[in-house]
Amino acid sequence: MLIQSFLTYIRCELGLSAHTVLSYSVDLRQLREFLTVKPQPKLPPGAGRVNEEDGFDPLTVSTSDIRQWMMTLAESGMSSRSLRRKLTAVSSFYAYLLRRGLVVRNPAHDVEMAKIPRPLPVNIRPAEINSIIEQDKNPDPAVDSFSHERDSLIFLMLYSTGMRRAELIGLKDADVDTFRGELKVLGKRNKERIIPFGSELREAVENYRRRRDLTVGGPTTTFFVRADGSPLYPMLVERVVKKAMQGRVHAGRLSPHVLRHSFASDMLNNGADLVAVQQLLGHESLATTQVYTHITYRELKQNYQLAHPRAGSSGASAPGCLSSRAGNGTKI
């Protein structure tokens, strides 16, 4: 059997895992079961046929057959990820047959992969972020002053600049220029970019530097440090941000990257140019930044549905309903 030969090949020669081999086996069996209910095409006189034990002949399968199978699976409600894996299994099988000279082309090659829906980034409402920042300006006297000063600045800097967690950890003290109000950030692929910041962050940076230098006994090369002068590590930053947001924001995810998303969506909501936001975030492609325009449109649509008297499917609302629906803190 050609399918069994292929499975032996990927297990013994390619060294794929038992889980992958089993998955490919199931995928190819499902294709075989789908196609054996259809009459097999007649081959020209004298042409050879390599039959599987149930009458399935992989050498007669066409692109149309595979496309029809994928459409049937999609209509049954199968996820995009599962569809992509099944098509990969079939394509790998025919690539194997192609190498053996049993077929002249891969019929799965021209079947388009199912697209995996890209979830919209999670962002936090500006009012919630402002509340956290303002509350942290009045710390509990029992809290360690250095740790509080540093952790408050971590939160403020992530939101005010949109930088990544790794960029914040790698920030050098010389890269934070309070005179110019600029940060020099080393991003992905070692690309540098300049991020401007305002007076609030400038004041917080200066307060932190004074507290840090007293705590560790002098200036440090790395901007953010622990009390012993050692640099931060990723999970520490994660904990700082999660602690600041826990129970204070309505978001399904609490992480430094959520603050990056919030920075981008708030910039666009307040009229920033898309290309400018791309440069501030350090995105290689504008398409990556454009995902945040979907957030701003979603919020715009929600506001429209809440505020416009004829946005509801049931028709016009009474004049008094506008204020009652808008009274939940939603901006109109």
Image (spheres, rainbow, N blue to C red):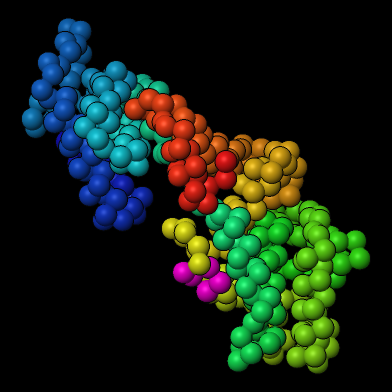
Q: Which residue lies furthest to the right in this view?
A: 179
Q: Quadrant of the C terminus?
A: top right
Answer yes or no: is residue 166 visible. no
Image-based side of 170 in relation to 289, left or right: right
Image-based side of 56 in relation to 293, left or right: left
Q: Is residue 71 above or below residue 20?
A: above
In magenta, the rendered stretch is 243-247
Answer yes or no: is residue 34 visible. yes
Q: Residue 264 at x, y = what percent?
A: 64, 49
- Determine the image quadrant of residue 101: top left
Q: In this view, does 297 lie above or below 200?
A: above
Q: How many numbered discs?
A: 0
Q: Is residue 245 within the magenta segment?
A: yes
Which residue shows up at 31% across the image and 47% down it? Answer: 10
- Determine the image quadrant of residue 80: top left
Which residue shows up at 21% across the image and 32% down it? Answer: 76
Q: In this view, does 18 lie above or below 238?
A: above
Q: Is residue 35 within the magenta segment?
A: no
Q: Residue 303 at x, y = what percent?
A: 52, 39
Q: In this view, does 230 lie above or below 175?
A: below
Q: Residue furthest left?
A: 54
Which residue shows up at 61% across the image and 75% down it? Answer: 233
Q: Residue 13 at x, y = what percent?
A: 33, 50
Q: In which quarter of the image is the N terminus?
A: top left
Q: Residue 159 at x, y = what percent?
A: 66, 60
Front position in the image: 301 or 201: 301
Which residue shows up at 50% across the image and 67% down it? Answer: 248
**Magenta stretch, overall SS:** helix
Image-based side of 304 in relation to 226, left or right: left
